[in-house]
Image (cartoon, rainbow, N blue to C red):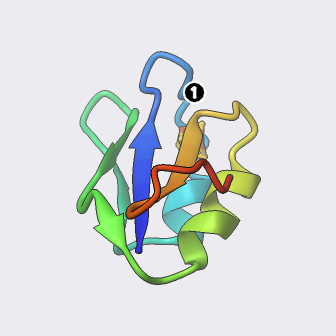
Amino acid sequence: MYRIVVDRQLCSGFGSCVDAAPKVFELDRSGVASLLISETDTADVLEAAESCPMGAISIFDADSGVQVS
Ligand code: SF4
């Protein structure tokens, strides 16, 4: 299971996270990424984190707390 954290201060609203993992990320009214869910077991969140040009997405192993992306 992955735990997802978005640094909304860093987010610039490019939306590539939404493209990569639309069940996890959305852009809110102010155009900043927000989370629909905070944990998932689907690996598309890793792709989303890598696609973020601002490095605003961090992914952790939910059990160990170790950062994986
Ligand atoms: S990819 Fe990064 S900068 Fe773009 S909306 Fe998502 S979190 Fe924000």
Could you classify mark 1 by the number of other residues whose Cα lies within 10 Å: few (under 14), some (14-19), or many (20 or more)? some
Residue at x 49%, y 71% (from the top left corner): 21
Residue 5 sits in quarter: top left
Residue at x 65%, y 56% (from the top left corner): 68
Would the CB of label 1 be found within 8 Å of ligand 1?
A: yes
- Judged left or right of residue 33, residue 20 is right
Q: Is residue 33 above or below residue 35?
A: above
Q: Quadrant of ligand 1?
A: top right
Residue at x 75%, y 55% (from the top left corner): 50
Q: Amino acid at mark 1?
A: Ser
Q: Nearer the viewer, residue 6 or 16?
A: 6
Picture coordinates of residue 55, whole percent (x, y): 69, 34
Residue projecting furthest to the top: 9
Residue 30 sits in quarter: top left
Q: Which residue is mark 1?
A: 12
Q: Is residue 30 above or below residue 22?
A: above
